[in-house]
Image (cartoon, coloured by chain):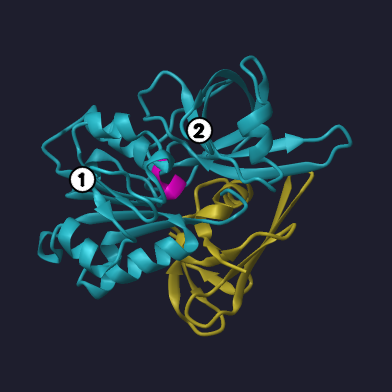
Amino acid sequence: MEAVDGNAIAGQLHQHFGTDMTTARGACAHCGARAMIAELAVYNQAPGAVARCRACGSVVMVVVEIHGTTGVNYAGFHLERT
Amino acid sequence: MAGAAVPGRLRWQSATVLELVDETPQCRTIALAPADWPGHLAGQHVDVRLTAEDGYQAQRSYSIASAPGDDALRLTVERIDDGEVSPYLADELRPGDELELRGPIGGYFVWEERLGGPLMLVAGGSGIVPFRAMLRHWAGGDRSIPARLLYSARTLEDLIYRQELAELGADVRFTLTREAPGGWDGHHGRIDRALLTEVVWPPAERPLVYVCGPSGFVEAAAQGLVDTGHQPGRIRTERFGPTGT
């Protein structure tokens, strides 16, 4: 399955965080590689979306949206607060 | 945050279909009047949601084709024949219908005049859509910023907005990857290092490069740019997949 990128989950993340998150940076909790959310590899052909680190392939974020409510698990991505 | 047109939560809202324009056999532009549109930046997208009678919902992301100052919000949708959303948008939608959307979305893949140039846009297939917004925005602003487009499509009839792009005043180069008609004076073949070297400003001029298209296209073009000496930090990418994002 081909990955797209973090732009594809921008709407859900904006909904969840209340602001655009595509330019937010963070570090992969597994390998430490830093990335902008827009650059993450995103697999979204399932009911939810999975974002992976482009350096090590680990899952850094899972996004689901059910009946208009968005849930985001970003335990694998250490967001840098600005 | 930088680049976000409007802070705060996104809301789903209704938009009225004003007009439908066939661009190519596979693509149609939908002109919309959203109930409450806060304005957008060139390069942003919207999420469109369809709800079936039984409550089943499907949503997809579509790039905004219109410039911030244009009179209507325009999306250009490519029909994915076995898709859940695009066949409805491309075939069934009629003027006067209502469509549910939220946006504008995204602050990364956007171009504003203050970001400067030289502005280099590299599009594959329907990856041209956000660049229509950027080039229209550029055309209405400071034209001393050099702008150039390299646009790859399979055939001549697959080139979206061909006439319009040629008339905007930017340096526009087309390449056709399959058949080229007799007398074709554009490029022929896929975007590779040789074509990038020929068309893109040299790395020393530090062009700001945007690449949009299917994932494989974006990977190849972005890698080609890095291989030919362009700084990764000057390259912004947006990939879409078979779901029509």
Residue A36's tag is: none
Residue B91 seen? yes
Q: Quadrant of residue B198?
A: bottom left
Most common SS among magenta residues: helix
Residue B157 among those drawn in magenta = no
**Residue located beneath label 2 in the image:** B75
State the count of labels: 2
Question: Residue at the location (13% across, 62% down)?
Answer: B202
Q: Is residue B111 above or below residue B16?
A: below
Of the pair A75 and A41, the residue shown nearer to us = A41
Query: Left of B116 or right of it: where is B20?
Result: right
Q: Is residue B186 above or below residue B234?
A: above
Chain letter for the cyan colouring in the rendering: B
The amino acid pointed to by label 2 is Leu
Task: Point out residue B78 in the picture as x, y percentages from the top left corner.
Answer: 54, 41
Amino acid residing under circle 1: Asp
Which chain comes out yellow in the rendered image?
A
Chain of residue at mark 2? B
Q: Which residues are magenta?
A: B125-129
Indicate left or right for A62 with B112 as reference.
Answer: right
Q: Is residue A37 visible?
A: no
**Which labelled disc corresponds to residue B185?**
1
Which residue is more in the foreground, A8 or B121? B121
Callout 2 and callout 1 share a chain? yes
Q: How many C-alpha atoms fall within 10 Å of the one at disc 1: few (<14), some, or many (≥20)?
A: few
Q: Give the percent coordinates (x, y) of residue B197.
A: 18, 64
x, y percent for residue B122: 31, 53
Q: Chain of mark 1?
A: B
Q: Nearer the viewer, residue A24 or B35?
A: B35
